[in-house]
Structure formats: structure tokens, C-alpha cells
Image (tube, rainbow, N blue to C red):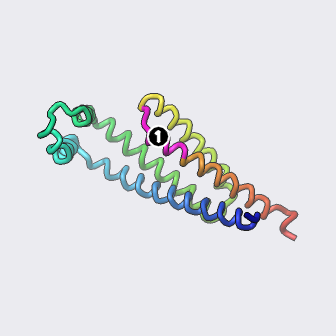
Amino acid sequence: MTSYSKRTVEHALFLCSVWIKGLAGVVETVGGFLVLFVTRKLLDSFLLFLTAPELAEDSADWVVNYLSSAVQRFSEGTKYFASVYLIVHGLIKIFLVTGLLRNKLWAYPLSLWFLGAFIVYQCYCFTHTHSIWLVLLTVFDLVVVFLIWQEYQWRKQTHSPAHSG
């Protein structure tokens, strides 16, 4: 693969990953606002709707009982924390993605810093949850970090004084 085609593929992957992050930021922000309207009663009704067939088969189903217990622990404090977290996390992503897509050099190191912080937080959360989804998200974020780093190096090189003349 020539260096030009390698660069083209890396840039395309960078753009795809950044657009995915941007879409995720929009979904998180909207979701954060929607969480404000969620009540325990609404969660109970939704859980019953989802799990009624399973409960009819096995009233001692571990997953259903776990989810039911989680709904019972859903407090106003939990709701507001989740809402604020999603809104702030989503807005940070949208801000950084906008900077990256507009080729703003400041957005690259700032994005790397925030992604690094989120990766550390995800690893911390994994020690408590052992969630495979956190592992997959962290691997994706590491790939995005690599792509942002590569794009940043290329952008710095093409914007250097040696390439301006």
C-alpha cells in the first residue's frame, strides 16, 4: 500500500470514527434531557412490559430480578446524576467533534486528553462492573485515539512553516 493510499484510508477511518463519536454525543445529550422525565413508575411499567413473558416462564429469572432491583434503587439523585453526566459528556463530544471536523489544531490534543480521561474512567468502572460493553467501548476509544493522533501528526506537518512556502 502506498503512503498516499495508507493516508487516505487512515483519514477515512478518522472521519468515520469522529462522526460516530459526534452522533453518540448527540444521542447522549438528548438522552440526558430525556432522563429528566423518567420516573420509577415509568421504569417499573417499562420493565414489566419487557419482562412479562420471561416472568411467566420463570419467576426466579436472575436477569429480571436484577433489573427489578436496579429499578427499585433508582432515586432522584441517580436520575439527576445520570442526566447531568450524559448531557455534559455529550456536549463535550459535540464540541470536540466540531473542532476536529473543522480541522482546528487545538481540538486534536484536547480530544486526546478527554478520550484518555474517559478511557481511564471506563477502566475504573470495569473493575466494578466487569462489563464486556465497557471493554468494547474502551477498545473503540483506543482506536479513535490512534486515529486522532495520526491525523494530528499529519495536520501539524502540513501546517508547519516548512510546508507553507
Q: Residue at x 50, y 37 (%)?
A: 122
Q: Is residue 4 above or below residue 41?
A: below
Name the residue at 67% across, 50% down. Answer: 109
Tell me, yes or no, whether the highlighted magenta stretch contains residue 134. yes
- Relative to the observer, which residue lies in front, 82 or 71? 71
Query: Magenta span covers which residues?
Result: 130-139
- Decide if residue 55 is on the left or right side of residue 136: left
- Tell whether 151 sits left or right of 115: right
Q: Secondary structure at mark 1?
A: helix
Quarter in which the N terminus is drawn: bottom right
The quadrant holding residue 67 is: top left
Image quarter of the C terminus: bottom right
Which residue appears farthest toward the left when viewing the image? 56
Q: Which amino acid type is marked by label 1? A: Leu
Residue 9 rendering spot, x and y as whole percentages: 65, 64
Compared with 64, 29 (above or below) is: below
Residue identifier under label 1:
134
Residue drawn at the location 87% of the way across and 63% of the way down:
162
Q: Is residue 3 left or right of residue 106?
A: right
Q: In the rendered picture of this protein, how many numbered marks are placed on residues?
A: 1
Residue 91 location (% of width, % of height): 48, 53
Occupied quadrant, residue 18: bottom right
The residue at the point 35 percent across, 41 percent down is 80
Instruction: Name the residue at the top extreme.
Output: 128
